[in-house]
Image (cartoon, grey):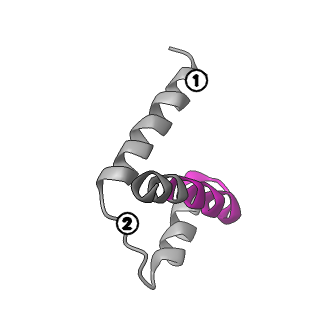
Amino acid sequence: MDEKRMGEIALAVLRDRVRREPIHLGPNYKRELGNAAKRLGISVDELKLFARTLIGEAVEETLG
């Protein structure tokens, strides 16, 4: 399996998880994003944009 297909599957799994599990946007959310970005080796801004996109899709799907 090539990396592109693996990425598509990973994104589908993540979207499913965001739709099915509660999202806790408490006071530590920004810190958790920062820590995750460090672990993953990506910028905090990129991760924030990614999270906004996924959460926005889930909200739009839920509320129509």
6 over 15 or under it: above or below: above
In the depicted structure, whether residue 33 falls above or below residue 3: below
Q: Which residue is mark 1?
A: 3
In front of the other: 7 or 17: 17
Tell me where residue 60 appears, x and y as whole percent: 50, 56
Q: Which mark is residue 23?
A: 2
Tell me the tag on residue 56: none
SS for dot 2: loop
Q: Is residue 48 magenta?
A: yes
Q: Position of residue 1 (x, y in %)?
A: 50, 14
Mark 2 crowd level (few <14, some 14–19, many ≥20, 10 Å Cα):
few
19 or 50, nearer to the observer = 19
Image point (49%, 38%), residue name? 11
Q: Is residue 18 left or right of residue 52?
A: left
Residue closest to the eye, 15 or 1 = 15
Q: Position of residue 47 (x, y in %)?
A: 61, 58
User: For the magenta stretch, what is the residue range?
Assistant: 40-55
44 lies left or right of 29: right
